[in-house]
Image: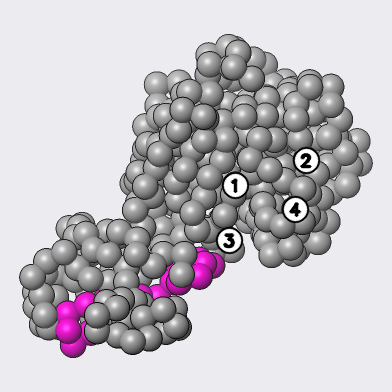
Amino acid sequence: MSEYPQVKHTVQLIKELVSIPSPSGNTRKVIDFCEEYLSGLNLEMKRNRKGGLLITVPGKNTDQHRMLTAHVDTLGAMVKEIKSNGRLKLAMIGGFRWNSVEGEYCEIETDSGKTYTGTILMKQTSVHVYKDAGEAKRNEQNIEVRIDEITNSEEETRKLGINVGDFVSFDPRVQVTASGFIKSRHLDDKASTAILLQLIKHIHTEKIELPYTTHFLISNNEEIGYGGNANISPETVEYLAVDMGALGEGQASDEYTVSICAKDSSGPYHYGLRKHLVQLAKDHNIEYKVDIYPYYGSDASAAINAGHDIVHGLVGPGIESSHAFERTHESSLINTEKLLLAYVQSPIVNI
Ligand SMILES: [Zn+2]
């Protein structure tokens, strides 16, 4: 694995991506970054109306297309209410538990683009004041944002320009360890986004001729269910979502291999495509795990649910403690990169 120095570029790109706040619904800056990253390669790129970025690489066969997607939107929150003490109540964007953001630093972005920092806390945090600090329920009633400005009333907070509907993003706290781990929020799915951007660059710089015209969608509404369910050309036969493998007790996935999803909450992924991905992994000595994710949906299942007649699949790096204190290892990134590189050059599954 050490003879794969290019993974350092992917890790660097992940660090940059997770540092750009992009809760679902407020992703323009991170999409701008992705477009900028690929600019100069002379690729066919366009934005869809939802704000995602679509990149097309023409292939030998233009009658049958392939599509790969990764999503760049993340979990986050919105100001739900300004409390009489000047603090903020939150509404969640995406699916997570309040305990997974308790104590987290955050950024509030006003509609004029001004940003403030704060901390997400239980109102009963101080053990010197609240007897029930440990037991009190972690919910939207008790969780609040302490803003790093002098404010003690709703009026003073409003004077800062903060309003209901402002976006709140969580500090990613990204760290890369000498042992090859990447610890950060939002590895779901910015790890895969970095891998796709690198793959596009690699195909271009190495002048790899793809067998089929291939579309890459950097989607921006996956966490709320409809990121990659449109902009699928009628020629598209295969649609592969690149999104995290889910880890936990009883899961096959880990932080070192590429996860190939057999089934999630939406049902089984296309059997033929899954077997094709496994065969590619075997042929190229790529370490992989086939797994089932109990509470999970992807852009590929969203596309199927939207009525597209496609062969759909899901692969991605294994992400520990997803939607919370996430971590993966560079070997999982390497295995995912290798599988995708083999996949885009392989024949379309014979269905
Ligand atoms: Zn995801």
Q: Residue at x 51, y 29 (%)?
A: 179
Disc 1 marks a residue whose amino acid type is: Ile
Q: Residue at x 30, y 59 (%)?
A: 105
The residue at which mark 1 appears reads as 319
Alpha carbon separation for disc pair 3 and 4? 26 Å
Local crowd at mark 1 within 10 Å, few (<14), some, or many (≥20)? Answer: many
User: Tag 3, which secondary structure?
Assistant: loop
Examine the rendering and report whether any part of residue 131 can be seen.
yes
Determine whether, in the image, residue 238 is placed left or right of residue 70: right
The residue at which mark 3 appears reads as 226
User: Tag 1, which secondary structure?
Assistant: strand
* Residue 210, image quadrant: top right
> The magenta stretch spans which residues?
83-98
Residue 88 among magenta residues: yes
- Mark found first going from the N terminus, 2 or 3: 3
Alpha carbon separation for disc pair 1 and 3? 22 Å
Determine whether, in the image, residue 316 is placed left or right of residue 266: left
